[in-house]
Amino acid sequence: MSNGTDYDINAIVNKQFELDYDAYNELGRVNISTFFALSYGLSFATIAATISHVGLFYGKDPDIHTKLMRTYEDIPAWWFYSLTVLSMAVALILCTVLIDQVQLPWWGLVFACGMSFVFTLPISIITATTNQAPGLNVISEYAMGLIRPGYPIANVCFKVYGYMSMSQAVAFLSDFKLGHYMKIPPRSMFVVQFVGTIVAGTINLSVAWWLLGSVENICHIEKLSANSPWTCPNDRVFFDASVIWGLVGPRRIFGPLGNYAAINYFFLIGAASPFVVYIFHRIFPDQKWILLINLPVLINATASMPPATAVNYNSWLLVGTIFNFFVFRYRKRWWQRYNYIFSAAMDAGVAFMAVLLYFALTMQNRSIVWWGTAGEHCPLAICPTAKGVDLGPDSVCPVF
């Protein structure tokens, strides 16, 4: 079994792909790095801060675009209800007929859909106002891991129905938001999204099925060459998460049976942090910049620190601060009028360059070395801190 952890997973899994408790107790507790544990804690704080922030700072907001869109016929409610009933019916059949394979009982599916329903509104508000979407991936894994530990496939399925359905709903609303500003008829947007979903889902499933059957040893990194493009890094992350949350369970990692119970305090920290901003806003109502402090976004961005670097955060913070200042300072001018267009142009530019660089460099196994790809520009960061270690006369590292 291929995985990206140092834990011997094969030793604690029985033939039904469930946790062998005797083998687990003999092998010992799961240990993760401090940075990895902190990343999980920040994810806990993000989802808690999202609920508090939306409850404190957002209420009924009149929208001139909504008045203008009333000219068009609205989407019939039964269109949404029909899709909901059909999707739930197919999912329930999957969870009952193939229960041995998916491990997710029918009540787990209902719970996942309920979690997605509750969190869609606050997360959509954060996404609509900041273009940063907090995720339910960690909290959904945590919840199912507490309820049904020892079943990793059930945890993965619960995550898909809980987190991915919310994520797709936010993407659906994001498209509607664009159509809302462009004054596109709602029914036309619905039909386009429906057809696009069917086409994309069919093609994605077909391609995945074809790859699994045609590429030998796909996703098995121990059987592939170092330059193979079929190592499936995202799938390994998904697999590791199923081991942590589903197979072993959060009680044996973040609970009384694990080593990281203190991480749960991040829930409390995240829920309380927006109140601090709100209190300062009430004390200094004339300081409008306080309202620009969005802790769910700041915490969520910090939770992505393992793949990101300080250069990423500094550039993001610099650009965001500059343009937020001009939008706030000159809100009656073009900064506010064309802010969404500028944001779309930036996204389109990134997407275009990603495709161009892939075909021009990645496919040719080439790379460009310049200041932006030269790391953190902190040569002393790799130096040893133990006393008496001398790396030679050509080294920049000091000897302590």
Image: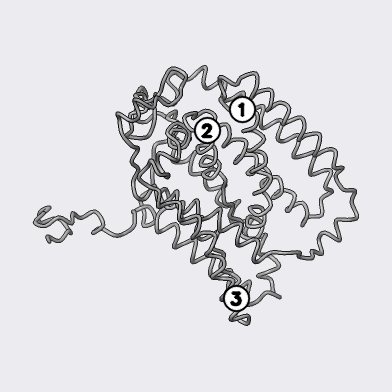
Q: Which is in the foreground here, disc 3 or disc 1?
A: 1
Check whether the beta carbons of the residues at disc 2 and disc 3 lie within 8 A of each other: no
The local secondary structure at tag 3 comes to helix
Residue type (three-letter) at the residue carrying disc 3: His
Give the residue at x 52% y 65%.
273
Residue 281: which numbered mark, if any?
3
The local secondary structure at tag 1 comes to loop
Residue type (three-letter) at the residue carrying disc 2: Arg
Residue 43, can we see it?
Answer: yes
Q: Nearer the viewer, residue 42 or 326?
A: 42
Check whether the beta carbons of the residues at disc 1 and disc 2 lie within 8 A of each other: yes
Query: From the image, which quarter does the C terminus lie in?
Result: bottom left
Q: Residues within 10 Å of mark 3 (few under 14, many from 20)?
A: some
* Residue at which label 2 appears: 148
Q: Nearer the viewer, residue 210 or 85?
A: 85
| Between discs 1 and 2, the one toward the N terminus | 1
Where residue 123 sits: x, y (%)?
63, 53
Q: Nearer the viewer, residue 350 or 269?
A: 269
Where residue 66 sits: x, y (%)?
82, 59
* Residue at which label 1 appears: 105
| Between discs 3 and 1, the one toward the N terminus | 1
Q: Residues within 10 Å of mark 1 (few under 14, many from 20)?
A: some
Where residue 188 sits: x, y (%)?
82, 43
Instruction: In the rendered view, tell whether residue 388 sits above or below residue 331.
Output: above
